[in-house]
């Protein structure tokens, strides 16, 4: 199948790109930096920003699934997540496309925030409040204006190996524990869902 990856040059996006190619899919990537993957016929690179509508259009034009794995390194306020979501939806509407959208945010975005442990709530309040405010807005934009979406909320990300032994939690419950998970396992979930989405309209939280 044809998969577009927005935010593909590092982290989960890079893991998604590598795994999708390994599984024989055609992959189009969008990133500011060159994606560090060897050239091959099944890989098409678009270099640019997720807030440039022409670059987004060039990336998603034939996609059956779009995987959004954007990230920022700074804890300062940003509009990247919400702005890119609006641009992506506008591009899809104008191009009459309806791929499955798999959008990475994090456990702590949206209504999951109050289900975090007390130490994590303090950590978010001190360091990640602004970033997660925009991720929450990203979730609202996607869920309120599109039909085929999954919003993926992993716990604390690590550089650990792929295990395939992670849990997928689809309901928010008092006392739930969402801890760490490797980027490789998150990528596995997202590629698997691109191939066969089973959590449409849901907010799966990923953890060990």
Image (tube, helix red, strand yellow):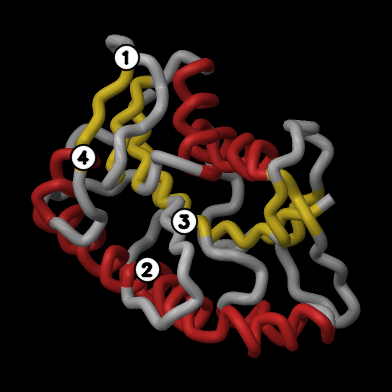
Q: Residue at horizontal 40%, vertical 40%?
A: 9
Q: Is residue 64 left or right of residue 198?
A: left
Q: Nearer the viewer, mark 1 or mark 2?
A: 1
Q: Are marks 1 and 3 in contact (CB under 8 Å)?
A: no
Instruction: Name the secondary structure under disc 2.
Output: helix
In percent of width and height, residue 151 lies at 53, 60
Residue 163, above or below 80: above
3 or 4: mark nearer the eye: 4
**Is 78 situated above or below 163?**
below
Q: Farthest residue toward the right?
A: 175
Task: Identify the residue position indicated by label 4 in the image.
Answer: 47
- In the picture, residue 41 is in which quadrant? top left
Which of the marked residues, 1 or 3, is nearer the chain's N terminus? 1
Mark 1 = which residue?
39
- Give the mark nearer the N terminus: 1 vs 2: 1
Residue where numbered disc 2 is placed: 81
Quadrant location of the N terminus in the rendered image: top left
Residue for badge 3: 103
- x then y, percent, for residue 152: 58, 57
Mark 1 in CB contact with mark 2 (< 8 angstroms): no
* Residue at (28, 64) in percent of width and height: 84
- SS category of the residue bearing label 3: strand
């Amino acid at each position: 199948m044809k998969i577009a990856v927005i935010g593909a040059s590092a982290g989960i996006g890079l893991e998604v790109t590598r795994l999708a190619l390994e599984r024989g899919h055609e992959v189009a990537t969008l990133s500011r930096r060159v994606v560090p993957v060897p050239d091959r016929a099944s890989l098409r690179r678009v270099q640019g920003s997720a807030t440039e509508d022409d670059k987004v259009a060039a990336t998603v034009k034939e996609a059956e699934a779009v995987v959004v794995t954007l990230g920022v390194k700074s804890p300062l306020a940003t509009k990247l997540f919400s702005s890119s979501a609006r641009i992506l939806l506008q591009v899809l509407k104008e191009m009459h496309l309806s791929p499955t959208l798999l959008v990475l945010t994090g456990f702590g975005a949206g209504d999951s925030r109050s289900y975090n442990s007390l130490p994590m709530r303090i950590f978010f309040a001190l360091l990640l409040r602004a970033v997660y405010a925009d991720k929450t807005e990203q979730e609202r934009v996607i869920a309120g204006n599109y039909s085929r979406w999954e919003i993926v909320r992993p716990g604390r990300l690590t550089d650990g190996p792929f295990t395939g032994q992670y849990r997928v939690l689809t309901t928010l419950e008092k006392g739930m524990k969402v801890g760490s998970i490797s980027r490789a396992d998150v990528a596995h979930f997202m590629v698997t869902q691109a191939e066969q989405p089973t959590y449409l309209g849901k907010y799966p939280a990923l953890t060990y």
